[in-house]
């Protein structure tokens, strides 16, 4: 009886952790470019006096990188990626990657994320937009221009194995894998990628 209770408890502990993952998905229904998470489960067999006992063990948490729906914002600094790819950004901890294209211009004229991290263009160069230089145009190939001419080009990168990306929160991902440039990326200005969380499915879970 005691062994049965331990096995049942192992399942309840895993269910509690799964509920935390689901709750986090629901909390990020409106977070731009958020990717839903799910847990994997496994059987953990331990030797007992009379026979082996099978416990439930939680494995890793994985991200679903399917593209979320795109919504029009008409904000010239909002950009969305059609298909695969990530925007590289510079943080104090090194390069990170995101699909959340809600950008801003900081006081020094750098294109930054809403956390204030520099958005990296081709060659890992920051994109500087002269203040008061007129309308900002971002072409589908990522070229950024103003009335004064071209000021840079957004870099879009891909990875051979998306499982190598580690979620650091705030839609930022870290990885030791080498990014692969995607020069054929299709970027749309004035659009933002929404969360790919299916709210009805998560509430059903």
Image (cartoon, helix red, strand yellow):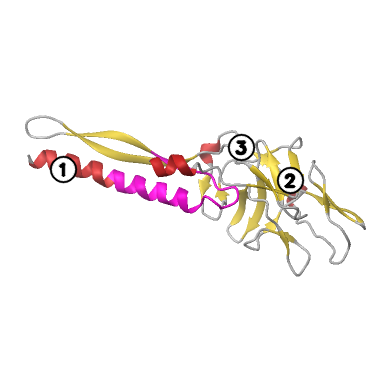
| Residue 182 found in image quarter | top right
The single residue placed furthest to the bottom in the displayed view is 107
- What residue would you read off at disc 1? 6
Q: Where is residue 98 in the image (x, y as percent from the top left)?
A: 62, 49
Q: Confirm whether the magenta stretch covers residue 182.
A: no
- Label 3 secondary element: loop
- What residue would you read off at disc 3? 159
- What residue would you read off at disc 2? 155
Image quadrant in which the N terminus is located? top left
Which region is colored magenta?
A: 14-39
Crowding near the residue tagged with mark 3, few <14, some 14–19, many ≥20 C-alpha atoms within 10 Å: some
- Comparing marks 2 and 1, which lies closer to the viewer? 1
Q: Which of 132 and 50 is in front in this view?
A: 132
> Is 105 drawn above or below residue 10 in the view shown?
below
Q: Where is residue 81 in the image (x, y as percent from the top left)?
A: 69, 42
The single residue placed furthest to the right in the displayed view is 148
Q: Where is residue 156 in the image (x, y as percent from the top left)?
A: 71, 43
Q: In this view, does 188 lie to the left or right of 130?
A: left
Q: Mark 2 near mark 3, Cβ–Cβ under 8 Å?
A: no
- Label 2 secondary element: loop
């Amino acid at each position: 009886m005691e062994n049965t209770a331990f096995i049942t408890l192992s399942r309840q502990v895993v269910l509690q952790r799964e509920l935390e993952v689901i709750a986090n998905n629901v909390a990020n229904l409106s977070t731009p470019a958020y990717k839903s998470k799910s847990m994997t489960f496994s059987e953990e067999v331990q030797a007992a006096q009379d026979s082996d006992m099978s416990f439930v063990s939680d494995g890793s948490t994985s991200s679903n990188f399917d593209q979320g729906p795109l919504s029009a914002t008409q904000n010239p600094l909002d950009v969305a990626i059609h298909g695969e790819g990530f925007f590289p950004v510079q943080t104090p901890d090194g390069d990170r990657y995101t699909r959340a294209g809600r950008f801003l211009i900081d006081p020094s004229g750098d294109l930054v994320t809403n956390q204030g991290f520099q958005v990296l263009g081709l060659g890992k160069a920051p994109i500087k937009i002269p203040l008061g230089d007129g309308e900002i145009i971002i072409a589908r190939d990522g070229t950024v221009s103003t009335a004064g001419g071209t000021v840079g080009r957004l870099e879009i990168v891909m990875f051979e194995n998306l499982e190598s990306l580690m979620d650091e929160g705030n839609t930022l991902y870290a990885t030791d894998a080498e990014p692969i440039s995607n020069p054929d990326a299709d970027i749309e200005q004035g659009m933002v990628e929404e969360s790919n969380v299916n709210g009805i499915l998560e509430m059903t879970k």
